[in-house]
Amino acid sequence: MKRIYLFCFRHSKIITVLSLVLFILSFYLSLNIKVNYDLYSLLPKDLPSVNALNELRSTFKLGEEAYILLPFKDPYEVDSLKKKVSQINGVSKVSWISDFQDIFLPDYFWDQNIKDKFIKDGYTFLKVEFIESSQSPLTKSAIKEINLILTKGSYFTGNAVIGQDLSELTQRETIRYLLIGSILVIIFLFFLLPSMYVPLLIYYTIFLSILVNTAISTLLGQEISFISRMIVGILQLGVTMDYAIFLYHRYEEESKTKSKEEAGWEAVRTTAVSIIASSATTVAGFLAMTYMRFGLGKDLGFILARGVLVSFISSLTILPVLLYEFHHKWANSKRWVLRIPGERLFNFVIRWRPVIFIIFLIGAFSLFVIPKFPMDYKLLRGLPENIPSMIGQKKLEDIFEKKSTIFAIGKESPDNWQEIIKVLKKDPYITGVMGYYEMVDPLLPDYMVPESVKETFFKDGVSYLTLDANFSYASQESYDFIKRMRDKIEKRYNVTFTGIPVLNYDLKNVTTDDLNKVNIISIIAIFMVVALSFLSLPIPILLVLVIEMAVTINLLIDYLTYGFIFFSSNLFIGAIQLGATIDYAVLLTSR
């Protein structure tokens, strides 16, 4: 191994050029990574609501809908727009009042019940359904085309459209977060390291590792969630920067008494031993997340764990070669650095150790008795309200009370479907029911019903209902409604509910179970790593308790600041913070 490193040092210029080539290739591949903006697609595939949504999509091409809200003046103009939109590639169907009512009749002859569903307060809406999921290029292209043909004063909204706005927003925000994080890290390193060149070399090494980690996902054809895309880079930068700093300090120390080649090898040899335990605890925390049923845990956990491994390898291979190649630059440009004296803090801790110990005991005890922080599951929270799709969504909710859309799908007899509709219409939260047995008079002979209407609601004996509800998804009202309907309908009839509110309810249940599981697994895994490192039982108990207290304080600050904790923060912060910061406790204890 030593010979390999000495060979690399002798050919440091070639290695440096190769690292630049790798940087450019990885950067290009990173731009082409597949990103998933639909968190509900990461739910377990065996959930009834997920299976029902898949059946709705495959059988009726439904489940990915959007709404065009526009001022109502001339029914023929609206019908003309409907025909234009329906001809766009990627659009499965466009629904409007003309599907259920002859618009050539004077409007005072129109069925008032149907009219109220589509026209209200001077506005009307078209319901647009797409052939493929909101993530497919075909749907994204269709959304862009629809936006181009809409007139001024119209709004285009719905989950598929909001998802596209979310895509554009997160792409901008990811770059912004990484840029801000990079600037702060470089400034911090400039203050703490004696040469202006070393922070740049360290940053280059870790940023290259981030690009390589992302490029690997592209090469493997992996689709990562937008949350992973946003936070993996900045987390990898912060969590693994220590490895490079450790190696630099060791290289600087060894170069005072040894040749550059020997100093480089000795730095690699000794640093590798010291950071293996550090990286092992971090990887253990990240891999604990992969045991979640919710797919985001596997997605984020594997990418972060791989990122730690890539940064570990880069810090022990590319960085020493760069330090060797630019040795004359950084070694001869020493300057003042910020020194942070620890004597005052140490004296304070020693003087007040009985009080600090009592606070620790209270904090450790509180971990087992304080209630869990409430989690917020509103996935669109934080999305700017001034973007067109969100403005349209708010207007649609206010005018037509379309705060949420729920689907009921299954194989049932006509009598049972009518019973189901009666139960649903009695519920105070349901503002509208659309289905075959609601739109068509049950006394009407079957041969008088147009085939197009039958095909809209029936296929191979399967039918569905579309429900409009006046509660927001992720609200207590929506959770209570879903529990009630599952007891009253799903248990009695061959019908399953699905849609965003139902999937969100299942997301809540799945992630609540995952949170407990991941916390236990991460604590056990890190406990074992620390116990094997120190060959002691009390030390890992104390260290894990200290970090768990820090995690709780971190979440408490978030809760007191915002009044809620976003579910993904609560879900991952325990494993990430425990795995990433246990190193400091280990380092202090070992010294």
Image (tube, rainbow, N blue to C red):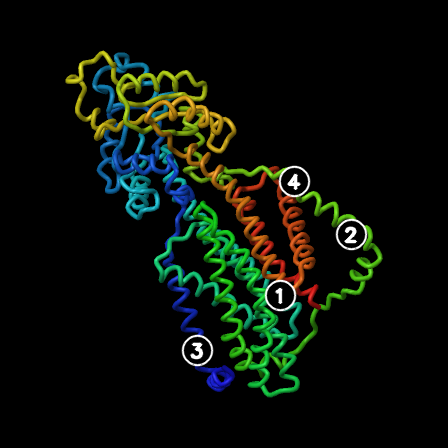
Q: What residue is pinned by disc 2?
A: 357
Of circles 4 and 2, the one toward us is 2
Seen at 41% across and 64% down, the residue is 27
User: How far across and down, in percent of the image, does residue 376 sit?
Assistant: 54, 38
Q: Is residue 399 visible?
A: no
Q: Amino acid at mark 3?
A: Val
* Image point (74%, 50%), residue name: 360
* Of the image marks 2 and 1, the number of the one nearer the N terminus: 2
Q: Which mark is residue 17?
A: 3
Q: Amino acid at mark 2?
A: Phe
**Which of disc 2 and disc 4 is earlier in sequence?**
2
User: Can you identify the residue that label 1 sits on?
Assistant: 533
At x 44%, y 65%, the residue is 212
Residue 267 figure quarter: bottom right
User: Distance between the Cα atoms at labels 4 and 1?
Assistant: 37 Å
Give the SS element for disc 3: helix
Label 4: which residue? 560
